[in-house]
Amino acid sequence: MARMRKKADLPTKICVQCGKPFAWRKKWERVWDEVRYCSDRCRAEAKRAPVRAAQD
């Protein structure tokens, strides 16, 4: 059985929409390089409006 990893040891990225950091998730294991948004909400907002994070 594999040992558990601490959340601090997982890779992180910065959300393109909100600019907040988010951590790796098991469901993103195969597509981690393609993940750009921290949540469905940020992905939906990115489609509706231009990026605000660059202005803040």
Image (cartoon, rainbow, N blue to C red):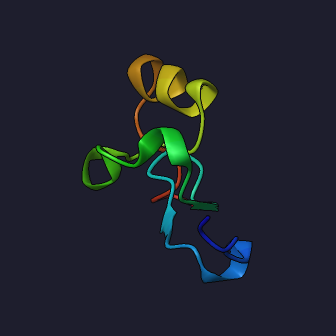
Examine the rendered structure and indicate whether residue 19 appears above or below residue 29.
Answer: below
Vertical position of residue 45 compared to residue 16: above or below: above
Query: Residue 48: x and y, percent?
Result: 45, 17
Q: Position of residue 50 (x, y in %)?
A: 40, 33
Quadrant in the rendering for residue 8: bottom right
The image shows residue 38 at horizontal and vertical percentages of 57, 45
Depth order, front residue of 19/37: 37
* Residue at (45, 59) in percent of width and height: 54
Instruction: State left or right for residue 15 relative to residue 3.
Output: left
How many marks overall?
Answer: 0
Q: Quadrant of residue 31?
A: top left
Task: Please tell me whether residue 6 is drawn above or below residue 23 in the rendered image.
Answer: below
Q: Residue furthest front?
A: 1
Percent across and percent down for residue 6 are 73, 77
Q: Between residues 44 and 11, which one lies in front from this camera angle?
A: 11
Q: Residue at x 61, y 64 (%)?
A: 1
In front of the other: 32 or 52: 32
Viewer-side residue, 53 vs 41? 41
Question: Is 43 placed left or right of 20 in the picture?
Answer: left
Eyeballing the image, is 51 above or below 46?
below
Q: Residue at x 59, y 49 (%)?
A: 18
Judged left or right of residue 25, residue 31 is left
Q: Residue at x 51, y 20 (%)?
A: 44
The C terminus lies in quadrant: bottom right
